[in-house]
Image (tube, rainbow, N blue to C red):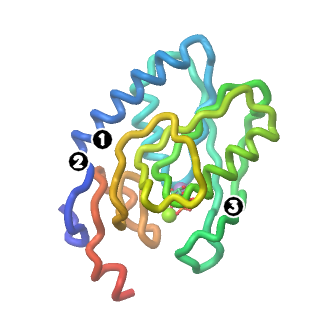
Amino acid sequence: MNSDIERVLVSEEEIAEANRRLGEQLSQDYAGKNPLFVCILRGAAMFMMDLIKNIDIPLEYDFMDVSSYGGENTVSTGDVRIIKDLDTSLRDRDVVIVEDIIDTGFTLDRLVELFNTRHAKSIKIVSFLDKPSRRIKHVHVDYNGVKIPDEFVVGYGMDYDERYRNLPYVGVLKQEVYSTK
Ligand code: PRP
Ligand code: MN
Ligand code: MG
């Protein structure tokens, strides 16, 4: 295990299991709809690529990069900036937003509002992790992998200062790593 990690919160086996379960459910719910999966960069990239391998119906996907935090702040400001927009029109599409984690809910709240103005036919959310204890904006999560307590997690796409995204599991970062910076 990486020496900066205090303990594993979601193991590779648990990740695979969650992806199988979510993939099966989404395959049923979106059969015949040609859904558009929208991956929110960068954190959700690893999750989305695993998830869609477990979906056995036709679908399309696209990527969007948004930033929810202003500058050096570690506290969410509720402001969501578009860094890279979608190339695909959302009009009359069944959209599935793919996120790695929902924390305060600001990112998804703003995205759902934005996608509604683009006339999507339906908008649903799949999030690998959910940290309900930190929620400020209520967001309905349609498909959730794992609910986690309020801890500083990295890995499986999630970073601290752009590191640890490539860990194949979700781990709790040792406090000394982020307190000595
Ligand atoms: C993280 C995470 C979600 C968002 C959740 O992304 O991947 O997208 O924050 O937080 P919220 O519910 O409080 O809005 P981040 O902005 O750190 O970018 P990244 O995915 O590129 O790491
Ligand atoms: Mn993100
Ligand atoms: Mg981040």
Q: Is mark 3 within 8 Å of ligand 1?
A: yes
Relative to 139, say whether 56 is above or below.
above
Residue at 30 percent of width and 41 percent of height: 15
Is disc 1 surrounded by few (<14), some (14 to 19) or many (20+) residues within 10 Å?
Answer: many
Amino acid at the residue labelled 2: Ser
Q: Distance of mark 1 from mark 2, alpha carbons?
A: 6 Å
Residue at 55 percent of width and 19 percent of height: 30
Q: Which residue is mark 3?
A: 80
Q: Distance of mark 2 from mark 3, alpha carbons?
A: 31 Å
Q: Which residue is mark 2?
A: 11
Q: Which residue is mark 1?
A: 15
Helix, strand, or loop for circle 3?
Answer: loop
Side of 23 where 91 appears, left or right = right
Q: Quadrant of residue 172?
A: bottom left
Helix, strand, or loop for circle 2?
Answer: loop
The location of residue 28, given as percent across then percent down, is 47, 16
Residue at 68 percent of width and 44 percent of height: 112
Amino acid at the residue labelled 1: Ile
Query: Which image quarter holds the C terminus?
Result: bottom left
